Image (tube, helix red, strand yellow):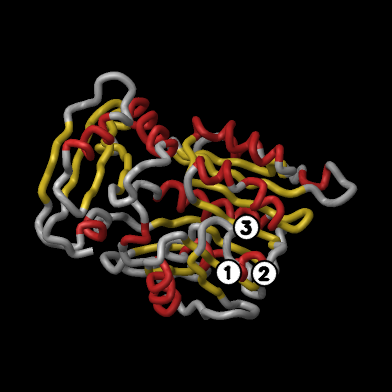
Amino acid sequence: MSDESAWKVTFLGPRDLIHAALIAHEDAFDWDPEIVIAGSEIAEDRPDDWQLEAWLARKPTRRDLAAMRALFAGTAPEAVVEHLPPTDWVTLSQSGIEPIREGPFHVHTPDHPPLHQAGVRNFLIPASQAFGTGQHATTAGCLAMLSAMKRRGVIVRNLADIGTGTGLLAFAALHLWPRARAVASDIDAVCGPVVALNADANGVALGDGIGRLAMVIASGMDHPLLRAAAPYDLLIANILAGPLVELAPDFANAVAPGGSVLLSGLLATQEPAVRVAYARAGLRLAARMQRGDWSVLWLRRRRTGSVRASRVGLLPEWSRRW
């Protein structure tokens, strides 16, 4: 988004403080959607020093700053307000991201070359509004979990990627299960053309049918195509903990008996609440992994008449940090 009035507000603080602010942001249902929030480490060698960044397409008002400070319990850190030069500032904020290498996948931006290695599936994903900020550990974790599911013998003929962003996880799932039908969705309308461009760049066929990906704009499961294509053998949702909890019943109803749900976008501290919500909806943990502060969960719906069917082998080594 090119905008001459792009601004950024930064708060520096310890990791726990920034995490708490991110959780408070999720719970702020009256939050102005034009203020984009992200949290991240300041540097790899300073894992306990974090920053909360807010981007606006206007100069922040006193009300804007007050809303940001209210995310912090007690006294908020000092706010650093910057007026950004006219540029595609969302893309610029992600232009330095390094490639992701997980399982058979190598995900890279145009700034990095593909890998010419046997068995490697390259995905070219340019930095864009739909790519997200600060969530690359969750993306890598989902790619690793999808690869592990394939190795464990999971069969997928019908899949959905909710909150797809760039379409990457749907692309990866179709690579692992090329005979599947797939539908991807996102609440943000900008993702429609982004997914179409990325599909074309990576040789992924769009449309309805085996080996193809259909794209819709929708909130949660609220779209006729998403409902008509159910039940799914695999449902992927790399979003946020709050929506994951809220959507647990809808996701459970959309998955076939014995089917899998792959969840990410949640902090490890948020994992218990998410797991409780899905247990109540009839799904049980198959495996988990942790990437830094982020959790990735693989859950399965019970098969009719068999409580044990969803208890696929818990892999002890997955409980450690990858």
Q: Circle 3 is placed at which residue position?
A: 235
What percent of the width, then of the height, locates residue 243? 52, 45
Of the numbered discs 1 and 2, the one sitting upstream in the chain is 1
Which residue: 75% across, 58% down?
A: 256
Which residue: 50% across, 49% down?
A: 141
Does residue 305 sit above or below 3 in this rendering? above
Q: Distance between the residues labelled 3 and 2?
A: 12 Å
Left of 46 or right of it: where is 252? right
Type of residue at label 2?
A: Ala
Q: Circle 2 is placed at which residue position?
A: 229
Which residue: 17% across, 44% down?
A: 60
Q: Which residue lies furthest to the right in this view?
A: 305
What percent of the width, then of the height, locates residue 43? 26, 38
Does residue 253 sit above or below 22 in this rendering? below
Left of 168 or right of it: where is 273? right
Q: How far apart are marks 1 and 3 (CA)?
A: 10 Å
Q: How far apart are marks 1 and 2 (CA)?
A: 8 Å
Callout 1 crowding tier (Cα within 10 Å): few <14, some 14–19, many ≥20: many
Q: Is residue 322 in sight in this rendering?
A: no
Callout 2 crowding tier (Cα within 10 Å): few <14, some 14–19, many ≥20: some
**Which label number is shown at residue 183?**
1
Which structural element holds mark 3?
A: strand
Residue contact between numbered discs 1 and 2, judged by CB atoms under 8 Å: yes
Of the numbered discs 1 and 3, the one sitting upstream in the chain is 1
Callout 3 crowding tier (Cα within 10 Å): few <14, some 14–19, many ≥20: many
Q: Quadrant of residue 46?
A: top left
Type of residue at label 1?
A: Val
Which structural element holds mark 2?
A: helix
Which residue: 58% across, 41% down?
A: 245
Type of residue at label 3?
A: Leu
Viewer-proximal residue among 31 and 247: 31
What percent of the width, then of the height, locates residue 176? 60, 66
